[in-house]
Amino acid sequence: TVVAAWRRVSSSRSNAKLMGQAKDVDDASSANFEDALLLLRSDIDEKRVFGVTLVLGHIGALRAEPKARAQVLEAIDVDFVNRLLRSVVPLQRIALALLRALLLDETSAEQLRRCIGPLAASCTRLAEAPPAEGNVDDAAAGWGLAEFSQVVEILRQAARFLPAAEVAAEVRPACSQLLQLAMSSSHTSEALRSDAEAVLPALHLVQEAALGDGVASEFVLAVCLSRQLRGSPAQLLALGLLAEQTEAGLASGGRLDEALSEAIAAGPAARMPALHLAAAALSRMGLSFGHTGGKPLFARLKPLLSWLAGELRLGLEGYAGDDNTCAACAALEAAIIAFGREASELESAGCFEEIADCLRQLHRALSDVHCFCTDLQGSDEVPTALPLIARVAAAWQLEDPRRFGSEFLRSVPVFCRLAPAEFAVLLPCVHELPDWHLTPACAKVFEVTLTCLEDVGAIPAARETFRQCALMLTEVALDAAAYLPDAAIPDVPARWQPQDTLRGTASALNATVSLPQGMGHLPRPLQAADPEHEGVKRLCMWSSALWSAGALSSAGALEELATLCGALLVSVPAETLS
């Protein structure tokens, strides 16, 4: 009856338009909206239903005009909307359309948030039998893909406009219930999981609501493994979500290898998410990819590493995008770390031929990295890929510093072009080099140390990075076999050029640092004979600059900073300080 009445109203408005009575139509439209508001304020549910149907005829105005939405929200009863959601399917569809039209800002979301629970409960219709063919009562039919898509969009709107606390308390449980029904064995659920247009909004919901429970992971994995969705935007998004869940430790590793196989089979379109997933799986699950038993999957590793090495070469030669090169470097870095972490288990397993095949691919990638750096030595260029390959080279040097030691030493001048935050990953590798203070890396270590003190936020883990730099510089400054004034000490930046601060710095160091008992007999570096030696002057200026910068910073402890600044002055004669 309600639907028939609404069709008569719509028909009369259409006829008026055809007759050219535009003004009368607008007047009738306004009158219909006011009548709809009066019906919504009624105490009789039948009148309210008719009022909702009239309001939905003005859906364009509701979406465009906050005033119209406010009038409807003031007239509507939330308990009435909840009763519609618990009613028969036609009335549920009316409630879904109303929620879609009103949930467009924070005010409406806050007023209608009590509808989220009943909305999730009404999703049980999704698990029922699909509508039958022929003349079947619509009230007896279950939900289809259209209703599922409506609920997904409503929950996305709620997650977008509600505060984070209410999203966690109400929206996420409703999303989990919806996804659990989508994973059921009903005919509609199976059709849903193979429909890219219906799955894509559901994946956006998982992403926007930050769902991290087992149901969301299971849903994402099911989309990744769906052959009907192979290569579709829905599968590409699902692969990216699976990689993020794997990195966060939210995804189980039982079928990661299958998902990676499906990603590779999807072709060039899925190359980027496939590389991202490979990096996440190697980093989190190791060489077994989370497979039961924990044994390395050499059948997967060898072709994967060959692919990663090839992808890296394509990127270095300019035939692949930066995103793909970045993902390939991340996966290679994770593979190198995984091999180093599981070295003892691999040795006890005795699969030396398979291990050699895998390492051969890693050697190929490292060789390409250092050849690329060699090609850059004739210019001052800093390619986009340089920070990425620096991480790969650093990961290998920490695990096996001898295999590519000479190549790494030749690449150091090129790596010194990196920004301090990007060079920080190389500090432990540089520290292992013989006479590293005689290489261009010495100037970079001073620069990174000062950056840690100047801007703590510029370098991730600035305190740990400062400690590494302080250890390196203090160690070489106090080494009796090294003579630091002859090292490649850089100029102090102009902003930290000392004026009359050297005496204050020296006296502050004398008041701060006290040598432990018994250190007087330790061998000391030679003191410079020339007070005007350029290296001696630079050591004085760096000691003063670091002390001044450290007084304004919280990156390094005062004791460590004082030890470093004092160590830089060990080879400095008293005449230079005075």
Image (tube, rainbow, N blue to C red):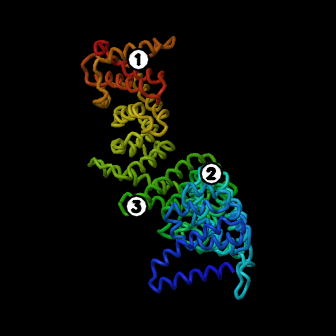
Q: Nearer the viewer, residue 521 or 392?
A: 392
Residue 8 vertical placement versus 510 (above, below): below
Number of dots carrying numbers: 3
Q: Which residue is mark 2?
A: 249
Q: Nearer the viewer, mark 1 or mark 3?
A: 3
Position of 471 with respect to 345 (left or right) is left
Q: CA distance from mark 2 to mark 1?
A: 50 Å
Q: To which quarter of the image does residue 180 belong?
A: bottom right
Relative to 360, is 553 above or below?
above
Residue underneath mark 3? 321
Mark 2 or 1: the one toward you: 2
Q: Are there few (<14), some (14-19), or many (20+) residues within 10 Å of tag 3?
A: few
The answer to whether 244 appears left or right of 131 in the picture is left
Q: Are discs 1 and 3 less than 8 Å apart at CB?
A: no
Q: 402 or 147: nearer the eye?
A: 147
- Give the residue pinned by disc 1: 524
Disc 3 is placed on an element classified as loop
Q: Quadrant of the C terminus?
A: top left
**Residue 223 percent location from the top left of the image:** 61, 67
Secondary structure of the residue carrying tag 2 is loop
Q: Earlier in the sequence, mark 1 or mark 3?
A: 3
Neighbor class of circle 1 (other Cα within 10 Å; few <14, some 14-19, many 20+) is some
Q: Quadrant of the N terminus?
A: bottom right
Label 1 sits on a secondary structure element that is loop
The residue depicted at 53 percent of the width and 74 percent of the height is 29
User: Does any portion of residue 395 appear in the rendered image?
Assistant: yes
CA gap, disc 2 and disc 3 = 28 Å
Tell me if label 2 and label 3 are in contact, CB under 8 Å. Answer: no
Taking depth in this image into account, of 428 and 576 the one nearest to the observer is: 576
Q: Residue at position x 44%, y 21% from top?
A: 563
